[in-house]
């Protein structure tokens, strides 16, 4: 499509994006809503890779607080991301969007192993690629997995989908005077500890010059406007 600013994107979704009203589990309707937005973007000619979290199913921090070994808790979270990836794949394929799930933890019965060149080939063929299993290593978040995969796959931008329209200097739900940023430098986001991504992911993006766009996925037009280069959300970059 003419006018596209970004031709290949990594969409980072939280696990809660799939959750029901109680914030837990997988709501097939939420998965379908997300899939419709992804389909619209794919039909614009944009290559789409997705990394999804697992907070709707499991939070490693909860296990750690109850005495669980952190590596064990993290591996459980990585497995939960594959469950979310499969649910999203099913919703996308119900809309006739050709999709592949790849996992950093090998489980051949349900997902391809993550192979960078194969993932790139899927994208070139117009398939949506959902990347589960985090980085395959404990102690790293799905934010870091998203930063790593976006760089590996040659994405133009990493888009973090949230329920708010950008990054604020404080919680806008608690502070009506919270200031929203249109643009941020990586170092400012890191030094001010703003709720963009964790510091490891931010530093990785900074070192590899991977821009991050934080926007409200539930605004039906926000993602499409951003891909066309219109001002949307908060752009975090080196500028």
Image (cartoon, rainbow, N blue to C red):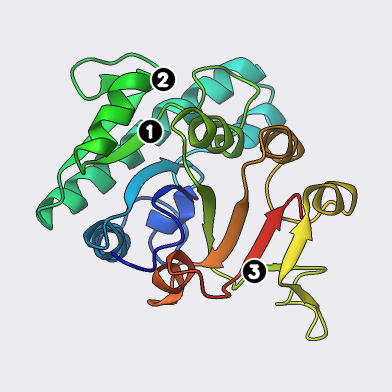
Tell me if residue 153 can be seen: yes
What residue sits 57% from the left and 24% below the top?
A: 73
Location of residue 207 in the rendering, given as x and y in whole percent from the top left corner: 73, 32
What residue sits 38% from the left and 62% below the top?
A: 20
Location of residue 79 in the rendering, given as x and y in whole percent from the top left corner: 41, 26
Location of residue 179 in the rendering, given as x and y in whole percent from the top left corner: 80, 77
On screen, residue 64 above or below 164: above
Q: Which residue is mark 2?
A: 104
Q: Few, some or many C-alpha atoms within 10 Å of disc 1 (few <14, some 14-19, many ≥20)?
A: many
What residue sits 27% from the left and 63% below the top?
A: 44
Q: Few, some or many C-alpha atoms within 10 Å of disc 2 (few <14, some 14-19, many ≥20)?
A: many
Determine the CA span between mark 3 and mark 1: 24 Å
Label for residue 166?
3
Q: Few, some or many C-alpha atoms within 10 Å of disc 3 (few <14, some 14-19, many ≥20)?
A: many
Asked if residue 59 lies left or right of residue 155, the reply is right
Label for residue 105?
none
On screen, residue 152 above or below 43: above
Secondary structure of the residue carrying tag 1 is strand
Residue sitting nearer the eye, 88 or 75: 88
The image quarter containing residue 81 is: top left
Do the residues under discs 1 and 2 have CB atoms within 8 angstroms? yes
Label for residue 131?
1
Determine the CA span between mark 1 and mark 2: 8 Å
Secondary structure of the residue carrying tag 3 is loop
**N-term mark: 1 or 2:** 2
């Amino acid at each position: 499509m003419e006018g596209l600013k970004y031709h290949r994107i990594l969409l980072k979704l939280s696990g809660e994006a799939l959750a029901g009203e109680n914030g837990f589990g997988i709501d097939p309707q939420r998965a379908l809503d997300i899939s419709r937005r992804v389909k619209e973007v794919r039909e614009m000619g944009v290559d789409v890779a997705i990394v999804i979290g697992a907070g709707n199913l499991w939070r490693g921090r909860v296990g750690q607080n109850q005495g669980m070994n952190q590596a064990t808790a993290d591996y459980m979270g990585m497995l939960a991301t594959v469950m979310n990836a499969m649910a999203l794949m099913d919703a996308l394929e119900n809309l006739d969007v050709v999709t592949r799930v790849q996992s950093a933890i090998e489980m051949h019965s349900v997902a391809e192993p993550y192979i960078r060149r194969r993932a790139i080939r899927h994208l070139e063929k117009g398939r949506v690629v959902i990347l589960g299993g985090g980085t395959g290593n404990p102690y790293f978040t799905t934010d870091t997995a998203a930063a790593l995969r976006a760089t590996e796959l040659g994405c133009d931008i990493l888009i973090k989908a949230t329920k708010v329209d950008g990054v604020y200097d404080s919680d806008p739900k608690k502070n009506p005077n919270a200031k929203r940023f249109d643009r941020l430098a990586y170092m400012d986001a890191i030094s001010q500890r703003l709720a963009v991504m964790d510091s490891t992911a931010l530093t990785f993006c900074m070192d590899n010059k991977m821009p991050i766009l934080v926007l409200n996925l539930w605004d039906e037009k926000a993602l499409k406007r951003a891909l066309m280069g219109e001002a949307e959300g908060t752009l975090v970059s080196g500028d």
